[in-house]
Amino acid sequence: MKSPAQHDEWKKGSAELLILSLLEDQPRHGYDISKLIQIRSGGALRFHVTSLYPLLHRMEKEGWIEGRWVEKAEQRRRRYYKLTAQGRKTLRAQQKSWKDFIAAISRVTGIEHA
């Protein structure tokens, strides 16, 4: 069984990949990103806004994503993020790196990945 510390380390190493992957198909706001990570991981991964928003801000500074404020009637203002061309390149590189890492772990441990 994984300890909470192990979960935190895995989350740090994969957070950018998860966010970039979710933004690949459409712009999303932070709360949506957070909920999708939780839902798609079956609850195994959770990002609290206190850690998610600084990460989104840093990724925006890197030029990987662009954010814009959107106001809708009867709703509070939300910042929607979308992938940039540089973000798409970064996503491809991180996907390849992750696949290579999983393959190496599989070769060493004999564990097949899904």
Image (tube, rainbow, N blue to C red):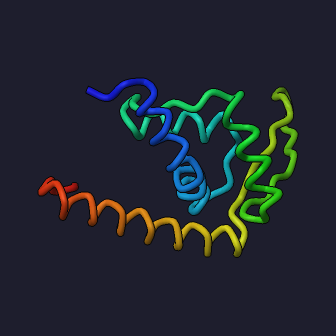
Give the image quarter of residue 73.
Answer: top right
- In the displayed orientation, state which residue is furthest to the front: 108
- Asked whether 59 or 100 is in front, the reply is 100
Is 72 situated above or below 93?
Answer: above
Where is residue 65 shown, x and y percent of the image? 74, 60
Q: How many tags in the picture?
A: 0
Nearest the eye: 35 or 60: 60
- Nearer-the-camera pick, 30 or 98: 98
Q: Quadrant of the C terminus?
A: bottom left
Vertical comparison of 86 with 21: above or below = below
Residue 15 x %, y %: 56, 47
Residue found 84% across the figure and 26% down from its top: 74
Residue occupying the point 15% across, 56% down: 112
Identify the residue at horizontal 70%, vertical 75% (top origin).
85
The quadrant in which the N terminus is found is: top left
Location of residue 63 in the rendering, given as x and y in whole percent from the top left corner: 78, 65
In the image, residue 95 sits, relative to residue 78, either above or below, namely below
Going 59% across and 53% down the picture, which residue do you hit?
16
32 left or right of 109 in image: right
- x, y (%) of residue 38? 47, 33
Determine which quarter of the picture holds residue 5. top left
Which quarter of the figure has residue 49? top right
